[in-house]
Amino acid sequence: MSALTFTLKHKPAQRVDMSPLVCNLLTGMALADINAITLQSGKCKLRVDELFTLEGADTQNIVIKNSLDNLDFIGKDLEGGSISVVGDAGAYLAFGMNAGEIKVSGNVGLYAACEMKKGYLEVSGNAGDFLGAALPGNKMGMKGGTILIKGNVGERVGDHMRRGNILIEGNAGDYCGSRMTAGTIAVMGQTGRHLGYAMRRGTLLFWNQPKLSASFNDCGAHTLAFLPILFASFKSLNSRFADASIAFNRVQRYSGDMSEMGRGEVLVKL
Amino acid sequence: MIINGVSIDATFAEAFPMKATRAIITAQNEKWALISAQAMTGFATSVIACGCEGSIERILDPSETPDGRPGVSIMIFAMGGKGLAKQLETRAGQCVLTSPTAALFAGIDGGIRIPLGKNLRYFGDGFQVSKQISGKRYWRIPVMDGEFLAEATTGQVDAIGGGNFLVLAESQPQALEACEAAIEEMRKIPNVIMPFPGGVVRSGSKVGSKYKTLGASTNDAFCPTLKGMTKTALSPEIESVMEIVIDGLTKEHIEKAMRVGMQAVCDLGAKNGIKRISAGNYGGKLGPFHFHLQEIMA
């Protein structure tokens, strides 16, 4: 059975809410029924077949072709299966995702993997601000799963993050890991200002020495036994993180944010 | 049945259902992994007084351990799940947490989950760190040599304890030599342990005693010095009897271990003073697992 493929016909005039087009909501539906689904776009409701050409039948394996950055909520509350986005994705990609896999070949917008619970998100390009964060006003961001970003990410990555892994091959913007409760964020590139701002617990793992605020204290150089296990868990990823030569277990450990609970840590490769 | 001049008794070993678990101890080198493992499985020869039976299962290559360091696999058996969990936690806390450079991991992924580092984390006094990696939770507990890393839980599974056979020889050195040969082969079998010192027990017991407070006492029928004083099971030329007790995860693994062990004893044969192989049982009324020696060696 070939993948259910949505090919975008033209750029929508307004942003489009793609949340009805997830594997668990399409299970058992005929193509005609899927074509008749209406998607919110600005003030309008558009039928799927007004925007997309449909092919294939496997609702557990969805492909969105010619995707653009104004397609929001792709993979919202995904319960399983896989979604492959060819092109860019808009805001709120993988919002509240519960299980399954989403891969994007281009860039993604704001709040990707916002409040994600489980599953795997891979982005070949860049991600916007608030990756893996909580919605404004909410206290719990990403609660599990793994996010892999091959490019750079914006500000506030992992804001209020509670569990899971965010792996960034490129650079991260300001306030990386802000208000983090737990989990791991690893950044191979450079990081911005106010790293770990108000973080309570959790691990920020870096290959390059970041500029730390005064509320992070140096705990010295250490060899940590959990790091080889953490790196081994990345082996199956299609990423530089899977490369054994980038792994390390010798780190400089900083604890913080001391203006908050102070149980968080910044680990920098030595 | 006679193999190489060694008579195999038409009897059986009687074994009991137990609960078992496995843990993996790693350290900076094999020496310290072994020290920790030996401490954790020390005083764990018999459930009669130790609360559990435990031993080193095998030494692990760094490629087989979760953190890529040299390691040792240990197994612990107890009569019930509650007792097993208590023994595991106490021993882990006193023998592995305390052991320089040691880390502790689950050795069984399935089964009922019982605490390994889950409660030891409180030793960290609030400074402990949890990490969930590939669905498994680990605790990083700050200690004076760095960090003690322990997986939160390990698996408890149904198992069998009390498989055994007796080696009857013309002299004490010959009995011991035969048992050592047997243990060397039996240690190559996975999923079994021989919990007694060096794998060999010289004080096999019977149920009951003339003293009311004792539940078990010396197996006088197999004591060579009592040949003229009791209803002996020994012929005049037998001067020494030693026993090998086997606990295992399945009947098949215990049978396999018994087979290779008895074969090693038989290979030494009558010319080295080995006369008989027998087994301990309680008439078949107490334990549901019966290991018939002749069937195993057939």
Image (cartoon, coloured by chain):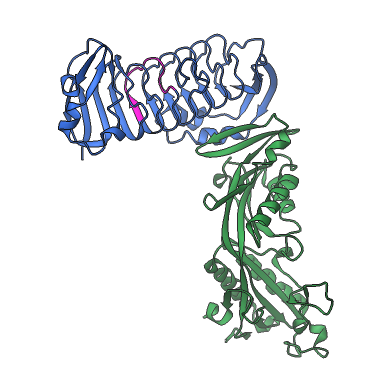
Chain colours: A blue, B green
Which residue: 55% across, 36% down?
A: A229
Which residue: 58% across, 74% down?
A: B288
Q: Quadrant of the N terminus of chain A?
A: top left
Question: Observer-nearest residue: B13 or B187?
Answer: B13
Residue A108 is one of the magenta-drawn residues:
yes
Q: Does residue B229 appear in this view? A: yes
Q: Is residue A10 above or below residue B224?
A: above
Q: Main secondary structure of the magenta part?
A: loop
Which residue: 70% across, 21% down?
A: A219
Q: Is residue B46 above or below residue A203?
A: below
Q: Is residue B183 above or below residue A178?
A: below
Q: Is residue B27 above or below residue A252?
A: below
Instruction: Please provide the residue range marked out in magenta.
Output: A102-114
Callout count:
0
Where residue B212 sits in the image (x, y, percent)? Answer: 83, 75
Which residue: 42% across, 23% down?
A: A113
Q: Is residue A97 left or right of residue B213?
A: left
Question: Observer-nearest residue: B122 or A42?
Answer: A42
- Say which quarter of the image contains residue A131: top left
- Say which quarter of the image contains residue A76: top left
Question: Observer-nearest residue: B128 or B99?
Answer: B128
